[in-house]
Amino acid sequence: MTKLVFLLSLLVVNSALSQIENYSKVPVTRIKYYQDFICFLGDNGKTRMDVFIQVPYTGVQFIKTGQGFEASYSITISVYDEDQENLITEKIWNEKITAYSFEQTVARDNFNLSHRSFELPKGKYFIKTLMLDKDSKDENTSDNTFTVKDLKNTPSISDVMLIKERTVVEGNSKIIPNISRNVYADKNGLPIFFEVYCDSSETLNIDYKVISENDETEYEKSEKTDLKSGNNQIFYTIDSVSLNLGKFQINVSINNLDGEVLGSSIKSFVSRWSGVPETISNLDKAVDQLVYIANKEEIDNINNAKEKSEKTKRFVEFWKSKDPNPDDEYNPVFNEYYNRVAYANANFSTYSLEGWRSDRGMVLIILGVPDNIDRHPFEYYAKPYEVWQYYDLNHSFLFVDETGFGDYRLSPDTPLYGDLYRFRY
């Protein structure tokens, strides 16, 4: 039987870093780690839950050493019952990344991948993951509810794993899982892996569907498959599918020849387009957020597209026109703009307004982070206010919290108008 090996060593991709000098004052919205939970059939009929943790190089702090650069972090995975009352099991381990050049530490495609396995009875669990950067002391957590499947009753199907890269060496399949679940279907198709368990040889139909978040079927195919007794490892690539930006799911089901569904698995993912920032997952909202850099005619041109694929194309073409280096897939202006949007949403959102729509969000997106912020949240004689200073513009902006609920409004005494209302990279 072909042996399956998860390739967990660090992936290093050499890439041109021509944009290092274009340092942005806005802290880059970086993903600290990705995670995925996948159930397979383990030993003695038990279900094995594999937990994968992918840490981008840009998500940790590197320290210069005599041999290059090193980053260290620890991972904690805590599994509780569904009500979070009892800790069932926990695993903690340390990881170290070694890079031989500064360029490797900031390359966007580099990451370190690790995983641990848990044998669990079927049921719902609360899973808390924690990543601690040992140098910066930065701690990041994620809370998740996950259902462990019962796979001992056959035929049954495991969870679906998205594949980033697969190689076959001496009959053994080596896989780098796609833990981020960012899919570029136009470049690589949609490669997946799963297992089907049978107690005897039989022929089943395996159905594949790709469904949009609006429940529209983007792809559908059924294949009659001969399966042997035991564990059947299935590799499948969905080709010739054109997906727009946004959230999708793949549904894989096994059916007998009479059409009865015997088992199914669903995997969610985000469809990406090359060069489009990862902070964008909703095209319609991303177009609305163009208001600070595009005029009405440009926005209308994008929104008036009859098909969503054409809308995406026009959106990408708009940003291509702003690219200072069109020959490079990475567009620094595109990324900076939506990084500012993400920063505004994370820091200036209120109970009634998304951060990018707020006055502080507007100024930050257009002009970037100010050189100095003078905050006065608890003045006895005045409402809370902030003064933002931009030294190179010789201009300050006054924001006043009129309601006391953090809704800072730009004062009419310091308006944003004229040449100031022009996006500055």
Image: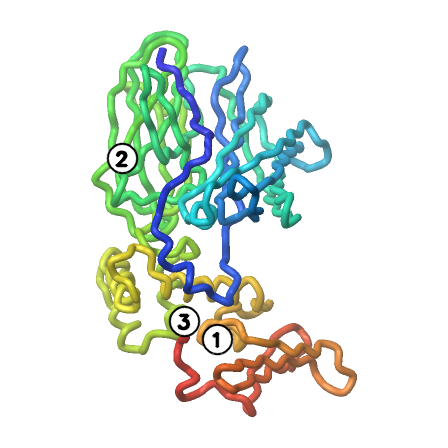
Q: Position of residue 75 (x, y in %)?
A: 61, 36
Q: Residue furthest front?
A: 66
Q: CA distance from mark 2 to mark 1?
A: 41 Å
Mark nearer the N terminus (3 vs 2): 2
The C terminus lies in quadrant: bottom left
What residue lies at 68% left-to-right and 28% top-to-bottom?
88
Circle number at residue 374: none
Circle number at residue 425: 3
Q: Is residue 109 left or right of residue 385?
A: left
Q: Are marks 2 and 1 in contact (CB under 8 Å)?
A: no
Q: Position of residue 98 (x, y in %)?
A: 51, 38
Q: Is residue 352 left or right of residue 38?
A: right
* Frontmost residue, 386 versus 7: 7
Coloration mode: rainbow
Q: Position of residue 68 (x, y in %)?
A: 51, 42
* Frontmost residue, 166 versus 281: 166
Q: Nearer the viewer, mark 2 or mark 1?
A: 1
**Is residue 357 at least partly visible in the picture?**
no
**Is residue 313 at least partly visible in the picture?**
yes
Mark nearer the N terminus (3 vs 1): 1
Amino acid under disc 1:
Met
The N terminus lies in quadrant: top left
Amino acid under disc 3:
Tyr
Q: Which residue is mark 2?
A: 238
Circle number at residue 362: 1
